[in-house]
Image: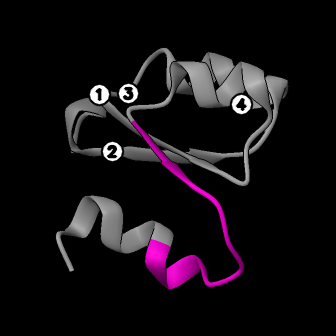
Amino acid sequence: MSRADCVAYGDSLSDTALFGVVPVSVAVNGDDHVSGMATHAYTGGDLREAYDLVAGG
């Protein structure tokens, strides 16, 4: 498995380093820093919906 196979999920500035090294990332109820870097953004309370953004569910 390589970084190309990974997806990062995060919500704040401390997650931006991780978002910078994987090809797909999801800001979950993210602040401005992380939402601006993410390839996807989710706002809500059901994390399954955040996973579905990348899984194609």
Location of residue 48 in the rendering, given as x and y in whole percent from the top left corner:
48, 83
Horizontal side of 37 relative to 15 (left or right) equals left
Cα gap from disc 3 to disc 1, whole angstroms: 4 Å
For the residues bearing labels 3 and 2, Cβ distance under 8 angstroms:
yes
Q: Which residue is mark 4?
A: 15
Which residue is painted at 80% across and 34% down in the image?
Answer: 31
SS type, badge 4: helix
Q: Would you call the spot at circle 2 few (<14 residues within 10 Å), some (14-19), or many (20 or more)?
A: few
Marks 2, 1: nearer the viewer: 1
Q: Which residues are magenta?
A: 40-49
Which residue is painted at 71% across and 80% down in the image?
Answer: 45
For the residues bearing labels 4 and 2, Cβ distance under 8 angstroms:
no
Query: Mark 2 vs mark 1: which is more N-terminal?
Result: 2
Which residue is painted at 33% across and 62% down in the image?
Answer: 53
Q: Which residue is mark 1?
A: 23
Cα gap from disc 3 to disc 4, whole angstroms: 11 Å
Name the image colouring. one colour
Q: Would you call the spot at circle 1 few (<14 residues within 10 Å), some (14-19), or many (20 or more)?
A: some
Q: Would you call the spot at circle 4 few (<14 residues within 10 Å), some (14-19), or many (20 or more)?
A: some
Q: Which residue is mark 3?
A: 22
Q: Which mark is residue 6?
A: 2
The amino acid pointed to by label 3 is Val
Locate the C terminus and report the quarter of the image it occupies. Answer: bottom left
Locate the N terminus and report the quarter of the image it occupies. Answer: top left
Location of residue 39 in the rendering, given as x and y in whole percent from the top left corner:
38, 32
